[in-house]
Amino acid sequence: MTVVQVQVQVEGPVRTVTLNRPEKRNAMNAEMLEQLHAAFKQPPGPAERVAVIRSTGRVFCAGLDLRERSGTLDQPGASPIEAVLHAIEHYPLPVVAVVQGDAIAGGNELALHCDLVVASTAAAFGMSLAQIGLAPTWFLAKKLLEVGGPVATREILLLGDPLPAERMHRLGLIARVAPPDELEAAADSVIGRLASNAPLSLRAMKALIVREMAFRDGIEHKDVDALVEAARTSADAREGIAARMERRQPHFEGR
């Protein structure tokens, strides 16, 4: 029996999609990715105006499940999260991420692929891929450049250290920050405004933004893809993931 790791609830104009794997810090395994993808491939109903992504527990999302990922490093192809993020980015209605806790690696990308992010000051965002021997795909790096620009993207990717929500806000990567006890009120304000705006305008504006930011897709990047693939299938990547799961410092050899 499939475990419900993604809960979907529609109340009036708001569709809420909740990650529900708190015991694993909402790390995304194959089942969660499949359920999350299905939630955003389903067309919104006529009364819906906005979608919201939330999660249960203290962590918003710790990224892809490393225990599952460690067994797929030799498999070629796009990152398994890309189809999910593409569905969210192209969802016809605005999508708001309500981030109560840390959003790391794939969790960071999940939040930033939403149209607006409302985060608790207790949350941190990060892409620790360089610390475990991996690199983001063209699709994933493109989103960081779109929302943060090259300076912020370099800091996030090359250093790999999590950034507090307040710094993410100052860098322009997220829309709102609020103390933990004020997060729901801040989120409700944003969601309520979206729900009260003209629905045809919202759909048109979202489509405009997504289409106008798609120019990077046409840039030739097969050589960059090869570099990313080499990192993903390297001995360093296996060592980095093993070290992260064993809670020790990795020993990288550049191979």
Image (cartoon, grey):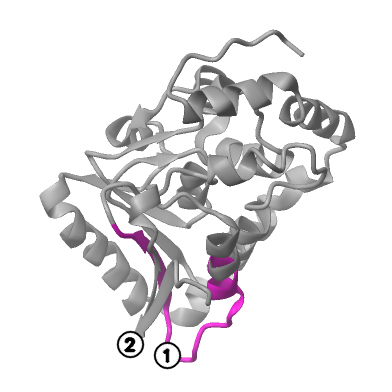
Indicate the quadrant containing the C terminus: top left, top right, bottom left or bottom right. Answer: top right
Q: Is residue 178 magenta?
A: no
Q: Which residue is found at the position 55% from the left and 32% from the top?
A: 149
Residue 142 horizontal/vertical position (percent)? 65, 40
Mark 1 = which residue? 47
Q: Secondary structure at mark 1?
A: loop
Q: Answer with mark 1 or mark 2, whichever residue precedes in sequence.
A: 2
**Amino acid carrying mark 1 in the image:** Ala
Picture residue at 60% right of the left edge, 66% below the top: 34
Q: Is residue 57 left or right of residue 36?
A: left
Residue 123 in view, yes or no: yes
Determine the CA span between mark 1 and mark 2. Answer: 7 Å
In the image, residue 87 sits, relative to residue 220, either above or below, namely below
Q: Which residues are magenta?
A: 36-56
Whole-percent x and y of residue 139? 69, 44
Q: Is residue 45 magenta?
A: yes
Q: Assign a secondary structure to mark 2.
A: loop
* Label ID, residue 118: none
Q: Is residue 91 visible?
A: no
- 28 vs 159: above or below: below
Q: Which residue is mark 2?
A: 12
Q: Which one is nearer the viewer's eye here, 22 or 40?
A: 22
Which of 172/22 is in front? Answer: 22
